[in-house]
Image (tube, rainbow, N blue to C red):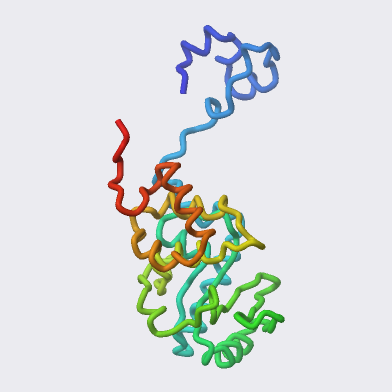
């Protein structure tokens, strides 16, 4: 941010107090200070603390916690997935959803417990998930992500993370990346939704495992090439930084 001294050289009106400045800006080109120069700096700690709030819907976090509490009390195994799982790992997601993974054998029991707790249940035409609503806020209960059933092995690949002060099992960063890449198809291939996840969680992701588990998908392969070209992660067999000065 420029000092007051440097601003004075641009235009005297910029050195006035905030109310006077807003009321008496001369409107000249020298007054047009870039927006980032007129805003207070955002510290990394504050950014992390406000990650959930940045989603613009704190009530969605409350709904997430309610679902987790019901599943815990009912002793139904689950794992948090989707964008809130990315945030729980300290990363960034461009999506706005609440996803829980459960086993297909636990679908009916989960719905019964959640309906008893005040949620509204819905069975959509898609046969790989069910939904519940909390005052209009939707939560997906997924039992077959990326055409692969949720199993005990799925739950073993989780990490206990705090989500708004509530501890819960969260899908590993590696599994989140695999799920994202395998969601790409000829009908849906928005790489812009995968880039924030890859960039923000790249150090927590086992990229060799990601390549192995997605090698059958040409869309995943294309995305991994993009990550290499953007120098987010190197291609298989290449050391990070190799070929760069």
Q: Nearer the viewer, residue 139 or 180?
A: 180
Q: Residue at x 43, y 49 (%)?
A: 199
Q: Residue at x 69, y 73 (%)?
A: 135
Left or right of 135, for residue 197: left
Q: Nearer the viewer, residue 15 or 64?
A: 64
Q: Residue at x 57, y 62 (%)?
A: 184
Q: Nearer the viewer, residue 234 or 53?
A: 234
Examine the rendered structure and indicate whether residue 119 appears above or below residue 2.
below
Examine the rendered structure and indicate whether residue 13 appears above or below residue 228.
above
Q: Position of residue 24 (x, y in %)?
A: 69, 16
- Is residue 180 visible in this depiction of the protein? no
- Where, by quadrant of the figure, is residue 89 drawn? bottom left
- Is residue 68 visible in this depiction of the protein? yes
Q: How many marks?
A: 0
- Where, by quadrant of the figure, is residue 130 drawn? bottom right
- Where, by quadrant of the figure, is residue 153 drawn? bottom left
Left or right of 52, for residue 160: left
Q: Position of residue 14 (x, y in %)?
A: 58, 15
Left or right of 70, for residue 132: right
Q: Nearer the viewer, residue 148 or 52?
A: 148
Q: Residue at x 65, y 72 (%)?
A: 138
Q: Position of residue 106 (x, y in %)?
A: 52, 90
Quarter of the picture containing the C terminus is: top left
């Amino acid at each position: 941010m420029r000092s007051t001294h440097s601003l004075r050289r641009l235009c005297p009106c910029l050195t006035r107090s905030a109310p006077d400045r807003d009321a008496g800006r001369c409107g000249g080109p020298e007054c047009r200070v870039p927006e980032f120069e007129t805003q207070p700096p955002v510290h990394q700690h504050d950014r992390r603390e406000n990650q959930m709030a940045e989603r613009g819907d704190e009530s969605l976090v409350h709904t997430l916690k309610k679902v987790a509490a019901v599943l815990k009390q009912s002793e139904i195994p689950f794992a948090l997935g989707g964008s809130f799982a990315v945030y729980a790992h300290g990363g960034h997601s461009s999506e706005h959803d609440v996803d829980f993974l459960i086993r297909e054998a636990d679908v009916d029991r989960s719905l019964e417990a959640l309906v008893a707790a005040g949620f509204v249940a819905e069975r959509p035409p898609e046969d790989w998930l069910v939904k519940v609503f909390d005052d209009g806020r939707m939560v997906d209960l997924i039992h077959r992500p990326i055409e692969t059933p949720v199993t005990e092995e799925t739950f073993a690949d989780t990490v206990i993370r705090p989500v708004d002060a509530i501890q819960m099992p969260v899908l590993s960063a590696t599994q989140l990346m695999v799920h994202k890449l395998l969601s790409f198809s000829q009908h849906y291939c928005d790489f812009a939704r995968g880039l924030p996840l890859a960039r923000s969680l790249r150090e927590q992701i086992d990229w060799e495992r990601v390549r192995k588990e997605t090698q059958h998908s040409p869309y995943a392969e294309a995305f991994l090439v993009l990550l290499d070209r953007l120098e987010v992660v190197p291609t298989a067999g290449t050391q990070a930084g190799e070929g760069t000065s």
